[in-house]
Image (cartoon, grey):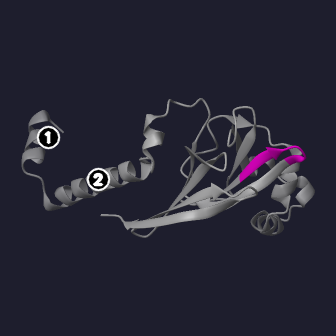
Amino acid sequence: MSRLMFQTAIRHPSPYRAATVCRFFALVLFLFAVGRPLNAEDEKAPHSPEQLRFSAEDVGVQRPIGIPQDVLAALREDKTVQNVLKSENITGASLPAEWFSASQVHLGDAVQKDIVVVGQPPISGGNVAIFWVFRLTVSGYELVLNVSSHDLIIRRTRWNGYKEIEAIGATGLTVSSVLYRFDGNQYRAHKQESSQVP
């Protein structure tokens, strides 16, 4: 397209082009709103070297690590994983490592090495991923949260000494978010919000 034709298209957009532009800006505003932290402290906090946001849109994680054996053992017991194993005619002992991607995080202090595991196809797919969050204890890794959503965000704000976690999902034109807080043993849903996409 020549420069003159481009300028003409901008000055005199067709109804279809105008609708497309409107939808594009609505999508940009939606993504901006979803991506903003719920807490002001998150905006003021310095950049973290660890990955704090995980998405179903991503292929794997930013800083992958090997999955410990006790975490793999817990994943083998997951009902969704067992159903996929059955449909693929695979035994639990042969659980494919490529079905998962794991990243190290710090839910408690800077020394404690916790893990977020993100399900990969065929475990997860589309705009929903399955997330497992494990905390390190004296007896090994312990599952503290299992949730299916589009995004999983580890907040910098804390409750009972552990960072809060937010799960964001979208169904049709509705965006929902659930804030989880650590109760001393597990992460429990604390607050849920939903809004309509413009």
- Provide the residue designation for mark 1: 6
Decide which of 111, 53 is in the foreground and name it. 111
Checking the image for residue 48, the label placed there is: none
Residue type at the position of mark 2 = Phe
Q: Is residue 75 left or right of residue 28?
A: right
Question: Which image quarter: residue 40?
Answer: top left
Q: Which residues are magenta?
A: 133-140
Query: What is the x, y in percent for residue 153?
Result: 56, 49
Identify the element where label 2 is drawn: helix
Q: Is residue 62 left or right of residue 35?
A: right
Residue 25 lies left or right of residue 187; in this view the side is left
What kind of residue is marked 1? Answer: Phe
Mark 2: few/some/many CA within 10 Å (<14, 14-19, 20+)? few
Q: Earlier in the sequence, mark 2 or mark 1?
A: 1
Magenta segment main secondary structure = strand
User: Residue at coordinates 86% horizontally, 61% vertically from top-left?
Assistant: 90
Q: Estimate the x, y position of residue 184 in percent, counting from the top left.
A: 73, 55
Query: Which residue carries the number 2 mark?
Result: 24
- Name the spot of residue 126 as percent of width and height, x first: 56, 60
- Say above or below: 84 vs 42: below
Magenta-span inclusion, residue 138: yes
**Mark 1 residue crowding within 10 angstroms, few (<14) / some (14–19) / many (20+):** few
Which residue is rendered at x = 60% and y = 38% of the image?
A: 51
